[in-house]
Amino acid sequence: MNFVIVHQSKKSRARVGRIHTAHGVIDTPNFVAVGTNGTLKALDSRTVDEIGLQLMFCNTYHLMLQPGSEVIRDAGGIHKFMNRTMPIITDSGGFQVFSLAYGSVASELKSQGTKQTSNSVLKITEEGVLFRSYRDGQKVLLTPETSVQAQKNIGADIIIPFDELPPYHIGRDALIKSLERTHRWEKRSLDAHLANPRDQAMYAVVHGGIDPELRLQSCKYLRELPFDGFAIGGSVGKNKTEMITMLSAMLPELPTDRPNHLLGIGDLPSIAECIPLGIDTFDSSYPTKAARHGTAFTKKGPVYITKGENTLRLEPIEKNCECHTCRHYTLAYLNHLFKAREVSALTLTTIHNLHYMVQLMASYREGIAAGLI
Amino acid sequence: MNFVIVHQSKKSRARVGRIHTAHGVIDTPNFVAVGTNGTLKALDSRTVDEIGLQLMFCNTYHLMLQPGSEVIRDAGGIHKFMNRTMPIITDSGGFQVFSLAYGSVASELKSQGTKQTSNSVLKITEEGVLFRSYRDGQKVLLTPETSVQAQKNIGADIIIPFDELPPYHIGRDALIKSLERTHRWEKRSLDAHLANPRDQAMYAVVHGGIDPELRLQSCKYLRELPFDGFAIGGSVGKNKTEMITMLSAMLPELPTDRPNHLLGIGDLPSIAECIPLGIDTFDSSYPTKAARHGTAFTKKGPVYITKGENTLRLEPIEKNCECHTCRHYTLAYLNHLFKAREVSALTLTTIHNLHYMVQLMASYREGIAAGLI
């Protein structure tokens, strides 16, 4: 992997870049759509290619349980398996395993505390995590080495070291212990990766929860290791203001010559605020999930397709939008498809939202190049 | 509409024909896929066009309740509404209304008798049928005139007169009364259609249940009216043998210069046996429904995609198949998508089965032209 900065803003830390991978280029800043199971929900890979999505996120946790990373290896890797020619990134599986153990940040913030929401995690040790597969009840041991092996089998262009996602409501001592173990796990992951790099790049994951000092400590530790990029993981605050404060402090501590990825955050206001801080890529299932719930993105804000007012709207979701859906279908038709519970409603709206994100990120790149951001 | 017989078999009543409509040609014999709600389930119209499906069946009953035939009229007709350039046929709505009242033939044959399986039909009179919408509970009056009006609003190339679907277990006197009323309803439908033909063709629906004499009587009555084609409706027997016997007796009673359509039957053995009897088009939701349940058609018989043996089958559903799915994806990937409950599993398998049907019908046309059928 090779990251080239094409243009560095003079007004902010924003930059236009190009990440060169074995499967082609990712222009940055960019949006990374999530295709958990090796398919972007409701889309076929040809359609995804046509939209121009340059980087897609797949989840190792899901793929190792179904169909199993060995199946993907035997199929010639994830690109061949799913018929995608462009770059793919996988995570380590850690996020999902620990989300199952601790519940999501959102459910914690609804004061459901740190209680376990699932019994699927059986044991967490220095070695790794033993959990029960949600598919067949089998015990699975996920360690830095098994996670990297699974990601080698899957064969994405960018992979992620195994890390712990600490609960949001965690005491400082426990957070320090978690961070130290995560650092050891990331180092083991990197070693396992470098023993067999195979045209893959590995991004570190910066942790430290909502503690600024620990976040800086994590940056300092990880930047000394030969990672190809830096992802920001874990909770960085309970709202956007806290997140912006934290990222503003952290990003200057990371090397400028490698790409920065913000894990799991891709709502439109966050993207707008994080690009000037130096975030290069954002992954989120939000635009595709919103589409499946009938929310279409436009420059004027969201359009709720199933609303009664759209029953007779004989115009596209957005005028002058060049996406397949807007070129061929009206809001009235999409409204009908949603009401008739037709799968093609999901497909056509996902196409629009993904196209919207691809265009939006291109406009951010233009804005940076033009000195506006 | 204009029907041209390109080749008449010397061995059977099979013929190769071309139905010319305002939206292009339908080569016959052909398969008609069912897109109840104005979309072929899990496919976008571009994909349907690419597969080469020449005629698509939409259901007036569903479309009049959602989004309403007036919405489709205001959108410029069903072709424009759903972005389809090729021909479309709609039914009258009668089949669905009466299915709801009497239950399906299948449920009757499971000796659930003639009892009403739904209270949605409120009243059947000479005027028509009053029923309750399954969507919003509103009362709807469906008559020959309102059915034709709805089909005018929808604007398909071929439309169907309003008819009664009598229950399978019906006494002869009641069947005679039903047939006579259906004939009156079909005549009223034809009159309403001819008052405003608008580039649409209307096929008669031959009835008479499983009574050969009444079937012949229906053929004799309807062939004297200026219908553009003839559809075979209602139950023609409780198994394929009975159906073949009935069709063998009926089809010679219908004019040879107009197309014959077999309503709602499109399983592979029936198609093989009915083409030599002179059936030109078959509509069925079976190939697309089978696809959504993981059954893919091949020349060697059905492939059940979700079977364990396909987990590692790194080959397409069918070797040398030219469909989009077989050119780009393996059985292992499709098996994975079904197991992961991904919508793209439905899309990709539907593409294959529809392609299979289109190719199969082309091979029947070649077989007839070559003197083999």
Image (cartoon, coloured by chain):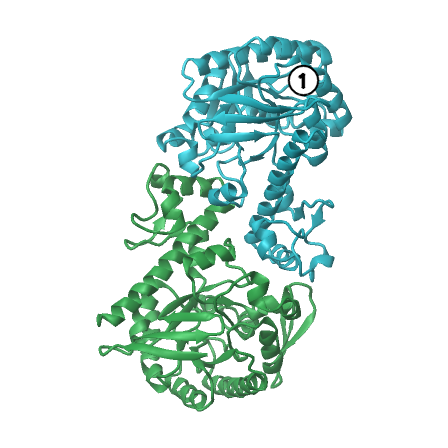
Chain colours: A cyan, B green
Instruction: Give left or right: position of A307 versus A259.
Output: right
Residue A204, image quadrant:
top right
Q: Chain of mark 1?
A: A
Q: Amino acid at mark 1?
A: Leu
Work out which quarter of the rendered image holds the C terminus of chain B and state it. bottom left
Instruction: Give me the residue at 43% from left, 38% from top.
Output: A82
Q: Residues within 10 Å of mark 1 (few under 14, many from 20)?
A: some
* The residue positioned farthest toward the right in the image shown: A241
Using the image, determine if residue A188 lies above or below residue B342.
above
Residue B351 horizontal/vertical position (percent)? 43, 53
Q: Observer-nearest residue: A316 or B214?
A: A316
The percent position of residue A334, horizontal first and vertical second, equals 62, 56
Residue A284 can be seen in this image: yes
Picture coordinates of residue B341, whole percent (x, y)? 50, 43
Closer to the camera in the image, A305 or B125: A305
Residue lying farthest front? A370
* A68 shown above or below A174: below
* Residue closer to the observer: B156 or B98: B156
Q: Is residue A39 left or right of residue A168?
A: left
Say if residue A141 shows up in the picture: no
The residue closer to the viewer here, A360 or B342, is: A360
Helix, strand or loop for disc 1: helix
- Which residue has dot 1 on it? A251
Q: How many marks?
A: 1
Q: Position of residue B17 (x, y in %)?
A: 35, 75
